[in-house]
Image (cartoon, rainbow, N blue to C red):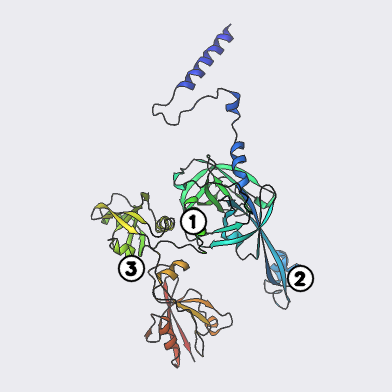
Amino acid sequence: MGNFAALMRFLTILLAAATIAPASGVGAKTVPKSQAQVQLSFAPLVKQAAPAVVNIYTQRVVEAVARSPLFDDPFFRRFFGERFGGGGGRAQRRQQNSLGSGVLLTADGMIVTNHHVIAGADEITVALSDRRVFEATLVLDDERTDLSVLKIDTEGEKLPYLELRDSDSLEVGDLVLAIGNPFNVGQTVTSGIVSALARTGIGVSDFQFFIQTDAAINPGNSGGALIAMDGRLVGVNTAIYSKSGASHGIGFAVPSAMVRAVLLSAKAGRHQVKRPWLGAATQVVSADIAGSLGMKRPRGVMVRALYGDGPADRAGMAVGDVILAIDGHAVASPKALNFRLGTRMIGKTARIEIWRDDDPEMLVLKLVAPPETPPRDITELTGRQPLAGATVANLSPALSEELGLDTLARGVIILKLDPRSPARRFRFRKGDQVLRVNESRVALVADLVAVMKQPADEWQITMQRGGKVHTIRIGQ
């Protein structure tokens, strides 16, 4: 009887605990009351979402120099050097294959994947979860976000697809599932949580604002789905942090807010994404800057320069203003600012909260595309002069945006170099901005062409590279 009484007391306490909720009413926990509750599973969610995740296979033909297989052995190369077997062989064409994953986003066969999955591909093949295979067409390729949109011809058949969920609704700690084809073993599902939001500094795209998750992501998962517990897409798995190439529980996904912007551009028939332009250069607000502006803590980004008559200028923004938020979303860094603008659509407006004179204010920014002013005037330089073989162009906000440069940058930039040209031999590089030749300032391609035609005993070419100014002196 004593054991029975003790058991009854335990059950009474257990049932009481199951019915008592925290005072706040948030996060109430209860004891499972049935076997069904104990056997909770992601299986129904996977059955719903997995058919919309596809495998992507690419092929391309590359040229390689034929050489002995011994030179692929690291031990052999250690003693004979990297260059020992690099020359003298005959170039051979061979087929190079790669694999990745993708996500169906429309019933008529539009698929989003990573740019790096299909980059340089001659053929793209999509395999559905039911083992049907389609040849895919590249609709839009956006290297800056590492996203691409493909299309397969379903001949009118409706395919399963994933709806997009607002990635801004995610919170750290939310459960997520990653679905893809790691190592080509077949479709695989892994679970985890959102480890962090708005991660930057990953270095795989220009618009760095990643969702971080500990759901296992491995090679082959790139382009696959990151889904929330309602079965909707919150991100496209893109990168991992790893020293071995395998998952260490640190994976990154492009948020669905950016995926939506790229998809809308593809649906509109564009081959590249046109993004709004702020027309301002910004910097992070440090503790010292915050104190000087009367802010209690560092936040937002400070405007350090404006493009005359640009969108920010017309909205009433001034140098020294601090941008705190865009459409209610806090902005903590220039990368966060770029991401928020990159997910907005041209032709609409955005509400910009700024800090000015010890007080927040609200401005309305018209979202317009960066202008092509001045025209690019892409020109290959020729003749007996040091820049022969360089292809140059006028920098404009539009070109700077495409190249991922500061959109306030002006002048002449080197777009490419002939490998056997004098410009290459004199160690000029793609991305160099030519500022001055001898005593002549260079503002436009026409200025550079004119000055390089003038004979000179010695050339002094001043350029900007990596934020630093260099001068190269070349004698005849």
Q: Which circle's residue, 3 or 2, is located before the other in the chain?
A: 2
Q: Amino acid at mark 1?
A: Leu
The residue carrying mark 3 is 307
Marks 1/3: CA–CA distance: 28 Å
| Residue in view at x 43 percent, y 81 percent | 445
Q: Residue farthest to the left?
A: 357
Camera-side residue of 475 and 416: 416
Q: Residue at x 46, y 77 (%)?
A: 393
Kindly identify which residue carries mark 1: 264
Eye-nearest disc, 1 or 3: 1
Q: CA distance from mark 3 to mark 2?
A: 57 Å
First in sequence: mark 2 or mark 1? 2
- Expressed as whole percent of the image width and height from the top left, the position of residue 116 reads 58, 60
Question: CB atoms at circles 3 and 2 under 8 Å apart?
Answer: no
Give the CA separation, mark 2 to mark 1.
Answer: 49 Å
Q: In the displayed orientation, state which residue is furthest to the top.
A: 1
Locate residue 44: give its quadrant: top right
Task: Work out which quarter of the rendered image holds the N terminus and state it.
Answer: top right
Looking at the image, which is closer to me, 394 or 24?
394
State the mark number for residue 68: 2
Marked residue nearer the N-terminal end (1 or 3): 1
What amino acid is at disc 2? Ser
Q: Is residue 226 visible?
A: yes
Report whether residue 240 is seen. no
